[in-house]
Amino acid sequence: MKELSLYENPPAICDVNYLNGFTSTEIFSKGGTDEVWGNKDEECNPFSFSSLDASIDYTFVSTSSEKLEETIKVDAKYDLQVVKVKDKRGIEKNSLHIKTDKPPTCEWIGMGIGWDGWQGKDLSTIINNAAIEFMARVDGDPIHNIPIVFILEDYSANQCYATAGYLGIEGGEVTKKWTRVIVPLSTFSYQTNNIDLTNIKQLLLQCYDKVDIYIDDIKIVEHKHNYKKISSTSLTVKDTALPIDIFSEKLNSAFGVNNNYCQNIKLSSDSDYSQGNYIDVNIDNDKCSWKKLGISWNNWLYSDLSKSIYGVYLEFDIKIDKFSSPKIFIEDYNGKKMALNFLKYIKEEKTNNWQKIKIPLKDFPIKKSEIDLKRIKNISFDFSDKDKLKIDNIKFTN
């Protein structure tokens, strides 16, 4: 007698030991189920399905048969069919396409995934040794920051938050080639938010800025790190003593300054400038697309400004060659931002001299932004193409 298997191809036995027995590891690989949902308001829904597949490299450049005949000298001629990568075949709902211009009328721009059939998931046993991993790509210029807040929500509607920072992006940038991104579970704000890690309902993705990105193969994987967890109170620095030095000579905790990827923003010094290093901004989109600088003055710890924001000023020195509409953002660890265009605070737009900018913090839209002043993450500057200026001595004063 011939022994027959119940299945033609027996399913592989899942090794659950490496994640303490946790089995709900696949969050998204292909869509089409009611586990994936978007905002009912179409204008505020950034999500749609895409046929792009993370298992396929779409960075190939297609060449027409006419071009091939020009470059390859052969007697025979072939009418080669041109295959465009974007017209690829396959499952229509392979990946997620998240795109939004962030309309000001939208209170919430996001989507959710109630993976594993919406059952409650127990993440409590893997919170320190696992991460959310996914593949990402863009159609346009590379990006170094993904403006999406990842939110874990339990069945009591409690939430905790994390973002995919620069250090979690493999190679430091997301390009037209699928890029691996890691968000460690230990970076979620579960310690400061009253969330039940034993009964997680879904993963939410909330856009806090303009974005156009494809995401695929979202899953929970083993993730080991050498960091030691400390109490939430140790993560907070209460900034009450003024002035607070944000930048004067070094950028120890910052993003946007990295000569390996882009030199639009860098540290420089001049022989005719006596105050040491300054931030040299020379935005050239033809060379690279990066035009944002972010600084954490407390080494990425929570900065508590709740007791010292009124009567406090943001000061910095600036030397302008060319600029259009520069903006300053103050951001918290929930992804909430308050923004301000500092054009009106500039005394002289056309001058070769350094000038001091002084902005009252109360001029920022504190209430409208709903920012958490007890959990400030960083201050950032957004520049435009062809902006050329220098910045120094950034600080909070009274």
Image: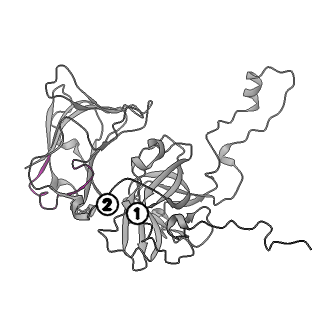
For the residues labelled 2 and 1, the Cα–Cα distance comes to 9 Å
N-term mark: 2 or 1? 1
Residue that carries the numbered disc 1 in the rendered image: 128
In the drawing, does residue 68 fall left or right of residue 182? right
* Local secondary structure at mark 2: loop
Counting other residues with Cα less than 10 Å from the Cα at mark 2, is it few (<14), some (14-19), or many (20 or more)?
few
Residue that carries the numbered disc 2 in the rendered image: 229
Residue 160, disc = none
Q: Give the range drawn in magenta.
A: 297-314
**Res 304 visible:** no
Residue 83 screen position, x and y as percent: 73, 41
Residue 91 screen position, x and y as percent: 69, 58
* Local secondary structure at mark 1: loop
Colouring chosen for the image of the structure: one colour
Q: Is residue 271 above or below residue 212?
A: above
Of residues 147 and 178, the one nearer the viewer is 178
The count of marks equals 2
User: Magenta span has 396?
Assistant: no
User: Magenta span has 313?
Assistant: yes
Q: What residue type is labelled 1?
A: Asn
Magenta span main SS = loop
Counting other residues with Cα less than 10 Å from the Cα at mark 1, is it few (<14), some (14-19), or many (20 or more)?
some
At 80% from the left and 35% from the top, the residue drawn is 80
Q: Which amino acid does label 2 sit on?
A: Lys
Residue 130 screen position, x and y as percent: 46, 61
At 75% from the left and 27% from the top, the residue drawn is 68
Residue 148 screen position, x and y as percent: 42, 57
**Pointers 2 and 1 in contact (CB under 8 A)?**
yes
Q: Residue furthest right?
A: 1
In the drawing, does residue 317 fall left or right of residue 199? left
